[in-house]
Amino acid sequence: MKIVQINSVCGQGSTGRIAVDIAIEVERRGHVCYIAYGHGNTDYQRSYKIGNRFEHLLHNILFSRLLGLQGYGSIVSTLKFVKWLKKIKPDIIHIHNLHANYINYRILFKYIISRKLPVIFTLHDCLNFTGKCTYFTANSCNKWKQECHKCPLYHKSGVPSIFFDWSRKMFRDKKMFYSRIERCKTIAVSKWLKEIAFESILNCNGHSVSYIYNWIDHRVFKPADKEEIERFYQKYDLPRDKRYLISVSQEWDMSATRTEDALAIAEKLPDDYYLILVGRMNRSFELPKNIIHIPYISSQMELAIAYSLADVYVHLSIQDTFGLVIGEAMACGTIPVTYNSTACSETPSSFGIVVPPRDINAIINSLSLIESKKARRLEMIEFVKNTYDKTINIGQYIETYTEIVQNEI
């Protein structure tokens, strides 16, 4: 088989690493896999970069922000990409993230439909079935079930539109194209997202919807030894007489609910606990003494050590399609505390503690249960190994490739 994956990045970020992981396993099993991407650079040899920085900037400013039509720019670069596809002659198109101002999805879908190519969608968020929103939970908006219009987030979600709300047009265009693709399978990254997608425009024309979990590198994410933890204590000057909660986010925005909740937790933490926040943070005030901020940890091995020294991983997001960082922490033996919202509560299974969204008192009260949860620590690590295994889960993708090419789905 010859597969072409399409994603905003290749080898970078969570979705970029997923695309490369799939490609490497596909190649190992004797098939051919290309990755087309929009941003950054990659070491993956069979890659194709769509557009350049100028085209991406033009798409962002003119089409996305001024006109409110993300995915409608990058016309020339997408036509060049389609020309390349015609030379490659793929058997399958596997689509990850089309947003990020690098591709014209109308041109792409017209090519797919004209060639009657089978398509795999991996849903990393919700943009594929909404007018323009990557997430809708925080606003309790369910217009996507019928038809997006008068979007409450048109100037906030994803790439904000300054002037125009084209959510209805964008929704209708997606619905029209999906109905014309002959063979299509949608793969969500969690059971929760699968159920949501099943109610959406992706579930049409005999297309199927299922889920395959993302995976965790168990060679990296595992309990750290005492020497590694001691070096981490020294590097970040951490008090050794404290117990630690840890939370990881790409960015701790002062206006975000997760940051508000982190500060609220700090106010109520018992004296023997500190909270570690990992991720970028722009702030103009001093953090409480019991919050330790680590701006960025580039090494996954060092991140695994950070998880290992903490008693609790507290996940403060209220809308996630898959809690990868939750699983990583569990693989290191750290007990997760999550909100009962979207897929956040799915990853921990019975090994974590689930509390109502933004219930700070419930988080504080849950600390009394941590020791009892630690009794199943080894069982939890084994659960993560089996459920979020790279070889097994990528194997499910390759089985799906074979099935859709043979027109079995």
Image (cartoon, rainbow, N blue to C red):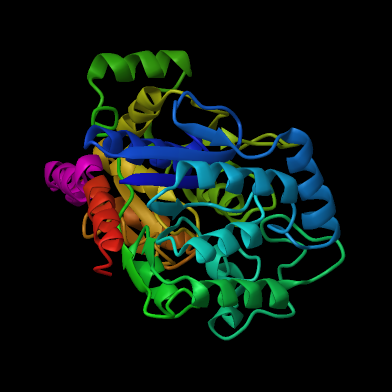
Q: Is residue 375 magenta?
A: yes
Magenta-tinted stretch? 372-392
User: Eyeballing the image, is 158 above or below 377?
Assistant: below
Residue 16: % across, % down: 47, 39
**Number of numbered discs visible in the structure rendering:** 0
Residue drawn at (57%, 78%) of the image: 144
Give the left or right position of residue 402, taking residue 379 as reference: right
In this rendered view, identify the residue nearer to me: 115 or 119. 115
Residue 358: % across, % down: 51, 63
User: Eyeballing the image, is 342 above or below 286?
Assistant: below
Residue furthest to the front in view is 87
Report the predominant secondary structure element of the magenta stretch.
helix
Q: Is residue 274 magenta?
A: no
Residue 349: % across, % down: 24, 59
Residue 181 appears in the figure: yes
Quarter assignment of residue 40: top right
Give the left or right position of residue 321, taking residue 379 as reference: right
Residue drawn at (51%, 60%) of the image: 112
